[in-house]
Amino acid sequence: MTEMKALTEIIAGLDLISDMAAFDPEKTFRDNDIDSLDVMSVFLAVEEHFGIKFPEEEALQINTPSQLLNAINERG
Amino acid sequence: MLGIEAIAVHIPPGRASNLDLRDTFDVDEAFLVDKIGVLERAVKAPEEDTSDLALAALEKLIEQQGLARDAIEVLVVVTQNPDSNLPHVSALVHGRAGLSPTCAAFDLSLGCSGYVYGLSVLQSFLAGNGLSRGVLITCDPYSKVIDPNDKNTVLLFGDAATATLIGPNPIFLCGPFTFGTQGDLTGALTCRKGILHMNGREVFNFAATVVPKDIVRLLELACLSKSDVDCFIFHQGSRYIVETLAKRLGLNKDGVRMDIMYTGNTVSSSIPILLKRELDNPSVRTLVMSGFGVGLSWSSCVCKRIGV
């Protein structure tokens, strides 16, 4: 079971967000100051870290870090 | 030794503003500048076709170099958007430019990897047949296939053509080369019924994972380290992808060329547009270029300045 702390560290490591203190996993990526291109970097980092792959249809339905965490955990 | 003697660039004067599309696609100027890296896209006139742009680049090269038309022994055009299926664009350009009847002319069907592939093909063709001078044209006007309502593509692509003279008095020698293909069975980048479709995440993942490995492979092949390379020219897919590649390779930003702000991603022309500037920049002695895109296909090579 992956914890939000691990996902937050992956996102922080990408250096996309100027103020990680304001990071809220329940908010959308965009409201977390992660634009549509940065979202691709987040997904790639997650896929590389966990050795998983999100199909495009599924990725399009994931709009928040919290939803992304659920999708990671659904893959065991 | 054969290599790059000169490059001519033709960018059509027409421009389409991305700023005008901010509301339509819910993007702001910072996103256009800092992420996509494109404020304006070069767009050909509606009555112009691929061979018109290609011919303009060739004529510019001929004029710029004082090149005799019968000195051109091979003409190669890299395009996937020809005027029509038949004949090939190189034949049209050959006829309109009045090149020699003994000049070989053929097209290469490649996209953003096409310039680097084309350099290798043309150099090899010349060397293998005892010829000394050929021209490589890139011309892939995506405005012919862009859906103006598709945010994934309309903000990115611009039209341009380039002509590169390969001959026996080069400024840059090119090689070694690396090549690769990851057959695109999922439709990451396709043109169906005359409309371009791009899965941005698939293309991004491909470039971000494959190209850095290919550069490492190329440098090993050339017995070079990153610090031996004065400048890197990546295909200008977007500002974001170029910066991602620089980041993943741990490159100094100063050594990574980037400029599509007022042209857009010009497909196979993006590398030679930037390379032309380096021909007259003696501080760049060794450069690496890498093209990647539709196919999915990629190719990289080292270029070394002669006489240093």
Image (cartoon, coloured by chain):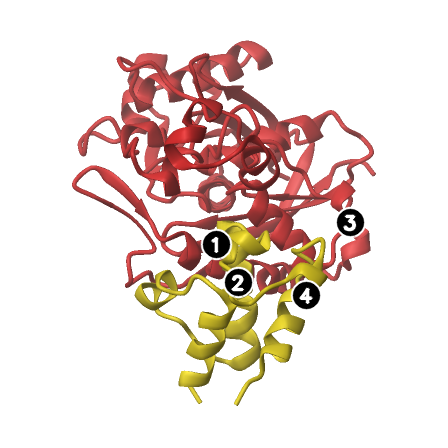
The chain ID associated with circle 3 is B
Q: Quadrant of residue A45?
A: bottom right
The chain ID associated with circle 2 is B
Task: Please name the amino acid that badge 3 sits on.
Answer: Asn
Residue at image mark 3? B252
Residue at image mark 1? B298
Q: Quadrant of residue A22?
A: bottom right
Give me the residue at 43% from left, 34% from top.
B155
In the figure, B175 relative to B261: above or below?
below
Q: Earlier in the sequence, mark 1 or mark 3?
A: 3
Task: Please name the amino acid that badge 1 sits on.
Answer: Trp
Which is nearer the eye, A13 or B142?
A: A13
The chain ID associated with circle 1 is B
Note whether residue B75 is visible. no
Give me the residue at 20% from left, 37% from top.
B194
Asked whether the residues under the numbered discs 4 and 3 touch, taking CB atoms below 8 Å apart as contact, a structural biologist would say: no
Task: Same chain for labels 1 and 3? Say yes or no.
Answer: yes
Rounded to the nearest angstrom, the CA distance separating label 4 from label 3 is 21 Å
Q: Secondary structure at mark 2?
A: helix
Asked whether the residues under the numbered discs 1 and 2 touch, taking CB atoms below 8 Å apart as contact, a structural biologist would say: yes
Which is nearer the eye, B5 or A49?
A: A49
Task: Please name the amino acid that badge 2 sits on.
Answer: Val
Q: For chain A, what colour was chosen?
A: yellow
Placement of the N terminus of chain B among the 4 image quadrants: top right
Rounded to the nearest angstrom, the CA distance separating label 4 from label 1 is 31 Å
Which is nearer the eye, B186 or A20?
A: A20
Task: Please name the amino acid that badge 4 sits on.
Answer: Ala
